[in-house]
Image (cartoon, rainbow, N blue to C red):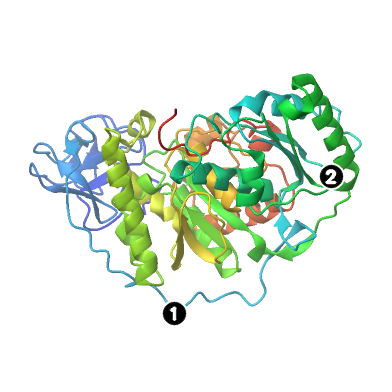
Amino acid sequence: MTARNQLTIRLHNSDNVVVAHKNIPAGTEIPEEKIICRDAISFGHKVAVTGIKKGEAVKKYGQIIGFAAQAIQPGEHVHTHNVSMGDFDRDYAFCADATPGVELVAEPAVFNGIVRPDGRVATRNYIGVISSVNCSASVCRYIADAFRGDALKDFPNVDGVVPIIHGTGCGMAGQGESFAYLLNTLAGYARHPNFAGVLLIGLGCEVMQTGSLLEGGGIKDGPFFHTMTIQETGGIRAAVDRGAEIIRDMLPVVNRVERQPVSAGHLILGLQCGGSDGYSGITANPALGAAADLLVRHGGTAVLGETPEVYGAEHLLTRRAVSRQVGEKLIERIRWWEDYTARNGGKMDNNPSPGNKAGGLTTILEKSLGAVAKGGSTNLVDVLEYARSITAKGFVFMDTPGYDPVSLTGMVAGGANIICFTTGRGSVYGCRPVPSIKLATNTEMYNRMAEDMDINCGVALDADTGIEELGEQIFRVMLETASGRKTKSETFGMGDNEFIPWQLGAVM
């Protein structure tokens, strides 16, 4: 990568840009590249190391990240003012880099998990209060609020009572893609092993009926799964009183759990990056990819999503597909997104965000090349639609938006029971009922936001710490977290407001 005393980071021999390792004043000589900076370059941003003609490809990671919108001289800052998107052919080379299989470790690592009666393994022990529609959201929150503070002091093994509320569930068609996404999402949360008990609450007259969720989600009423509607119960006060009573009846049994050693193969890891910067694809994302590879070799599952943020790098995933069919499923989702954004007056290169650009990311191509590094290097074994159940072992892809809470809502609905979230600008995302481990891409931000960051991946640049070593550290923290150790976001109680299902179609 780079020596600590060097000013820039070269990621591939064929690159015509390098990344600033620290703030570089104009006029500074970069000895390792034999150039002088014509502009001031902020850390994480790019500087040209050769002349780049107008229309010529700009290359980083050995891949195209855009095209010069004007002639660029050696030493000039390379960013949105002189780089633009452009079409180019990607060689999907389906299965070209797939291996015969993953060599599993002889003795998988273990963590202390909670084994449910049906054999599923949980990393947390919550009770969920889930709204079928926005009209019942306040009642769900009122019920959950009754169990804050010291209300659970006699139930130390219960992690909390979580309101799962949202802004839709009515004013929508009662069938079709949007309805199916919401149903699968709500049902996925209702079935999630991290919920020992669930209370599902509707208003009574909405499109997303509680009965539809029971039938479509394959869920049955029982001692730890209850449904009710505000209208049938007699209004807000009656519903809150009845809901709190149902949860109080659950608590003594839900509290009777003991963690026990289980294989790391029971972990389903959601991979996410948010508030990315120019170091995301250099430190935290590759390190998380190394941890994902370790988890797969220990028999677990790693889930990559954010389809708009693999755009331009999808060929790196299709090459790892175990079959052409799996690779084609990913490309079909890419084509769907191209059509979807066009229908809604957008473009795939509307991403990166302003914060991403301030951190040094210029185009979606550059962002995507860094983002796919979270997925490690093992075979791509499956491609899933949003919020579908994750059943395959190994590295899988779920079609989700890039917007962090919507993306992770889909993964958790699919069964993810632990999350690793890389960030360069400083995302403070939390997720209940699933612990979210946050990985900082650079030391400056980690030190500034140490209360919110769990791991500093900036040491890959600042110290003699390699990516593989960092990956092993992340893997160990994953096991400790899955065993009950609280993440920084959990200490703040974050995660009640981050449930955001993907909403498609017309609101009527």
- In the picture, measured across the screen, residue 451 lies left or right of residue 58, that is right
* Alpha carbon separation for disc pair 1 and 2: 43 Å
- Rendering quarter of residue 454: top right
Q: Nearer the viewer, residue 199 or 392?
A: 199
Residue 495 drawn at (x, y percent): 63, 34
Image quarter where the N terminus lies is bottom left
Residue at (65%, 32%) from the top-left corner? Answer: 496
Residue 3 position, x and y percent, is: 38, 51
Which residue has dot 2 on it? Answer: 157
Residue 220 seen from this side: yes
Q: Quadrant of residue 268?
A: bottom right
Compared with residue 53, is residue 244 higher up or lower down, i.e. above or below?
above
What is the secondary structure assignment of the residue under circle 2? loop
Residue at disc 1, secondary structure: loop
Up the image or down, 178 lies above or below 475; here it is: above
Judging by the rendered image, the residue that carries numbered circle 1 is 100
Q: Which mark is residue 265?
A: none
Kind of residue indicated by mark 2 = Asn
- Of residue 166 and residue 300, the one placed in the foreground of this image is 166
**Tag 1: amino acid:** Pro
Q: Earlier in the sequence, mark 1 or mark 2?
A: 1
Residue positioned 79% across, 20% down in the render: 237
x%, y% of residue 27?
20, 31
Q: Residue furthest bottom?
A: 100
Query: In the rendered view of the protein, which quadrant contains the C terminus?
Result: top left
Using the rendered view, name the quadrant where residue 48 is placed: top left
Q: Residue at x 83, y 47 (%)?
A: 223
Q: Judge the density around disc 1: few (<14), some (14-19), many (≥20) Cα neighbours within 10 Å.
A: few
Q: Is residue 293 positioned above or below 352 on the image?
A: below
Q: Nearest the camera: 372 or 227? A: 227
Q: Tell me if 313 is positioned left or right of 194 in this view.
A: left
- Nearer to me, 448 or 454: 454
